[in-house]
Image (spheres, helix red, strand yellow):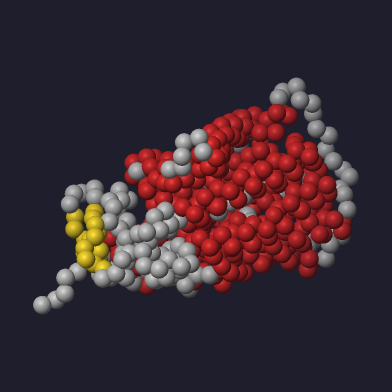
């Protein structure tokens, strides 16, 4: 006769993600909304030093984000760095025009500290219940655990979708524009060469085809470590080349005289500056996913390796963003262009006095970075599409299905980029609506999950930051909308320039 086993009922999770330990899992459905996992184990669940897989819903081992758990601190650094430096960093000198040197640096430092703190919250919320080994490897999953399914989808569905799919669309638009800049740099003043340039839609298509082709070789997030490493190196190189060459070329003296503040434009510009600085730091919607690739055990939690990676990556991000903001404002002042920021300004003012090799290298590093970052931001979308197939078929996606999903996603993002080529102009307004995902939700989720003592230090800090964050996001959204109303929007539908 078989020996008796110890049966333990785990807590019910409305997110329908059930823990799986080293033993066999038996699932008993008791209603349409709740699932109880019956864990069969011959040893206590909190035995010291035992390895365990982490959460997981049995389907998670087939999905791109949680398929591989062989990550490390170094890989996390590459993922965080590649996803954390984006085209918004090139716009930072614009924020300094209205804020000035002192307030610009102060606001940038406050935003840096605030977002580093909320990243720390997410890293520690990744495993909200160490005793059960449950891991929240997706931002929406943590929202569900914190607030329930209905409220989580209401609060988090749009921001997470925009910060994944919307960012990929903006990468296509900006990447295509930089490709055109690179082509014009190579042509120089050769009119016959310039006449052979592609249209805006064709540049977008070229970028999308390269991105989708590269995506076919990387089945999961952990396998993208090489891509993230290349994207990180090129991002840092592009930033350093831009500010070093700008210092070398000196200040531009033909500045545009600005009008007075009679129409309230000064206050509006200040609000825009706040929004630019807040949107410059990105990647919070990928922190939990990146941590989900790192193995965990009862002796060494994944948060240890992940936090080490966060510190290293944020130091490098600061080394890129502060010089870009300070040197960009010093060199170009109010001649920084809204389209690609300091990159466009450098090419416009110094192309004649700079070798083609240096200018081409700056453009090329930016293009490669956008192609690499596209892969990381597209991974949550691939994960969601594959989840639909896995839930219906109860098996892993075959290679041809995965390839089809990536091609369809690429086609969709390309269509939207051609239909809405002015989307980057709406970036500050839409980004302000998604900003609570970075500044507010981590604070509220900490209170909901950790339940700190009322009026304790952690309770006061998170409630205070949450309230200030809501007001700040509303102010940024209002300022961005005000600018759109006053300045107008060139809504060139289906006419990419």
Residue 431 horizontal/vertical position (percent): 56, 43
Q: Is residue 57 above or below residue 489?
A: below
Looking at the image, which residue is at 50% across and 70% down? 71
For the residue pair 157 and 23, the one nearer the viewer reads as: 23
Q: Is 415 displayed left or right of 482 in the figure?
A: left
The image quarter in which residue 75 lies? bottom right
The image quarter in which residue 239 lies? bottom right
Looking at the image, which residue is at 60% across and 56% down? 84
Instruction: Report the residue that reaches farthest toward the left.
Output: 1
For the residue pair 270 and 13, the one nearer the viewer reads as: 13
Looking at the image, which residue is at 50% across and 35% down? 455
Residue 16 horizontal/vertical position (percent): 29, 53
User: Taking the image as drawn, is residue 477 in sight?
Assistant: no
User: Taking the image as drawn, is residue 39 in sight?
Assistant: yes
For the residue pair 199 and 291, the one nearer the viewer reads as: 291
Q: Is 415 displayed left or right of 37 in the figure?
A: right
Looking at the image, which residue is at 68% across and 30% down? 268
Q: Is 162 displayed left or right of 368 in the figure?
A: left
Quadrant into which the N terminus falls = bottom left
Q: Is residue 22 above or below residue 389?
A: below
Instruction: Report the residue that reaches farthest toward the bottom.
Output: 1
Residue 467 horizontal/vertical position (percent): 53, 33
Residue 24 horizontal/vertical position (percent): 25, 69
The image quarter in which residue 484 lies? top right
Q: Is 289 displayed left or right of 316 in the figure?
A: left
């Amino acid at each position: 006769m078989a020996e008796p086993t110890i049966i333990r009922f785990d807590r019910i999770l409305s997110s329908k993600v059930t823990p799986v330990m080293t033993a066999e899992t038996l699932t008993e459905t008791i209603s349409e909304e709740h699932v109880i996992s019956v864990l069969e184990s011959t040893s206590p669940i909190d035995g010291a030093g035992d390895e365990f897989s982490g959460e997981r819903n049995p389907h998670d081992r087939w999905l791109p984000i949680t398929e591989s758990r062989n990550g490390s601190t170094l890989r996390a650094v590459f993922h965080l760095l590649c996803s954390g430096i984006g085209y918004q960093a090139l716009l930072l000198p614009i924020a300094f025009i209205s804020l000035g040197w002192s307030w610009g640096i102060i606001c940038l430092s406050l935003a840096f500290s605030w977002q580093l703190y909320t990243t720390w919250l997410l890293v520690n919320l990744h495993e909200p219940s160490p005793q059960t080994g449950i891991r929240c490897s997706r931002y929406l999953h943590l929202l569900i655990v914190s607030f329930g399914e209905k409220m989580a989808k209401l609060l988090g569905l749009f921001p997470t979708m925009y910060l994944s799919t919307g960012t990929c669309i903006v990468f296509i638009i900006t990447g295509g524009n930089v490709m055109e800049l690179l082509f014009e740099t190579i042509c120089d003043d050769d009119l016959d060469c310039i006449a052979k340039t592609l249209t805006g839609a064709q540049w977008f298509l070229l970028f999308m085809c390269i991105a989708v082709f590269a995506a076919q070789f990387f089945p999961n997030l952990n396998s993208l470590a090489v891509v993230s490493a290349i994207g990180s190196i090129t991002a840092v190189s592009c930033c350093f080349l831009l500010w070093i060459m700008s210092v070398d070329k000196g200040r531009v003296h033909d500045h545009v005289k600005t009008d007075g503040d009679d129409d309230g434009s000064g206050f509006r510009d200040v609000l825009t500056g706040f929004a630019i600085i807040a949107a410059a730091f990105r990647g919070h919607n990928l922190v939990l996913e990146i941590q989900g690739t790192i193995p965990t055990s009862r002796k060494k939690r994944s948060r240890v390796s992940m936090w080490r990676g966060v510190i290293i990556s944020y130091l490098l991000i600061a080394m890129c963003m502060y010089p870009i903001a300070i040197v960009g404002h010093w060199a170009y002042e109010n001649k920084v262009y809204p389209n690609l920021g300091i990159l466009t300004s450098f090419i416009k003012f110094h192309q004649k006095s700079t070798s083609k090799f240096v200018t081409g290298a700056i453009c090329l590093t930016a293009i490669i970075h956008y192609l690499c970052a596209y892969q990381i931001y597209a991974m949550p979308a691939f994960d969601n599409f594959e989840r639909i197939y896995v839930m219906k078929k109860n098996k892993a996606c075959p290679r041809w299905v995965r390839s089809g999903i990536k091609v369809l996603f690429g086609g969709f993002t390309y269509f939207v980029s051609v239909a809405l080529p002015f989307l980057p102009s709406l970036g500050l307004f839409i980004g302000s609506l998604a900003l609570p995902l970075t500044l507010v939700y981590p604070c509220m989720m900490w209170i909901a999950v950790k339940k700190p003592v009322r009026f304790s230090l952690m309770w006061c800090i998170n409630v205070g930051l949450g309230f200030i964050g809501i007001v700040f996001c509303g102010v940024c959204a209002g300022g961005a909308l005000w600018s759109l109303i006053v300045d107008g929007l060139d809504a060139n539908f289906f006419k990419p320039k």
